[in-house]
Amino acid sequence: DTEVTQTPKHLVMGMTNKKSLKCEQHMGHRAMYWYKQKAKKPPELMFVYSYEKLSINESVPSRFSPECPNSSLLNLHLHALQPEDSALYLCASSQVASGETQYFGPGTRLLVL
Amino acid sequence: GENVEQHPSTLSVQEGDSAVIKCTYSDSASNYFPWYKQELGKGPQLIIDIRSNVGEKKDQRIAVTLNKTAKHFSLHITETQPEDSAVYFCAASIRGADGLTFGKGTHLIIQP
């Protein structure tokens, strides 16, 4: 089973709202990722967690706040977003030991009004 | 950082013909090269990958070749079918468990 699940599938929020995106995997992977994908563009890396610790933060604005409560869960907390933050947010995971093969979830499509 | 170039941006082929998508990378330290297929409204799906100690890998109708000297790798799809229509992304990674750098994507259209 190589499934990564993400909730919600769709999210509409105002610029003053606070919301969270959730990601879950039960493959025993110890690395988890957040990517942002704009329409007709490739995914862009936002954050990397390795063994529940933030290892890479690609200069993402502080209005995006990641959290890894345990090895199976990854959250992305959203606050005071801008309309240009509207995008597909993808979660992925990989085994840290072999590292490379990343499995993606279906994404959360976010619209900021 | 790593930079991945992908060509063409759009590729239209007749059903049953072969399709080839090419990528180049900039950092010689990159050692892992996956290919993803993304259908409309879905997340990227891994279809094949190759590591830098291998020159070619094949899985049924799909193959990937890697030329480390020239720093380029290619995806080959034979006997294309309508369900192959999607956007394909190549990617490169310098170190395991780090993020991937993606090419800009190729929209593959299979004409019936």
Image (cartoon, rainbow, N blue to C red):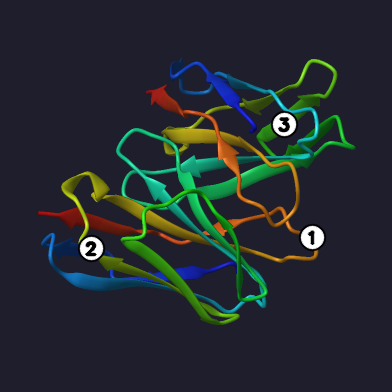
SS under mark 1: loop
Gap between marks 3 and 2, in whole Å? 34 Å
Q: Position of residue A31 (x, y in %)?
A: 64, 66
Residue B90: quadrant of the picture: top right
Indicate which disc residue B64 carries: 3
Q: Disc 1 marks which amino acid?
A: Ser
Identify residue for label 1: A98
- Assign the C terminus of chain B to one quadrant of the image: top left
The chain under label 3 reads B
The structure residue drawn at horizontal position 71% and vertical position 32%, both measured from the top left corner, is B63
Q: What residue would you read off at disc 2?
A: A10
Q: Is residue B16 left or right of residue A89?
A: right
| Disc 1/disc 3 C-alpha distance (Å) | 20 Å
- Give whichever of A56, B47 is nearer the camera: A56
- Provide the secondary structure element on which disc 2 rests: strand
Marks 3 and 2 share the same chain: no
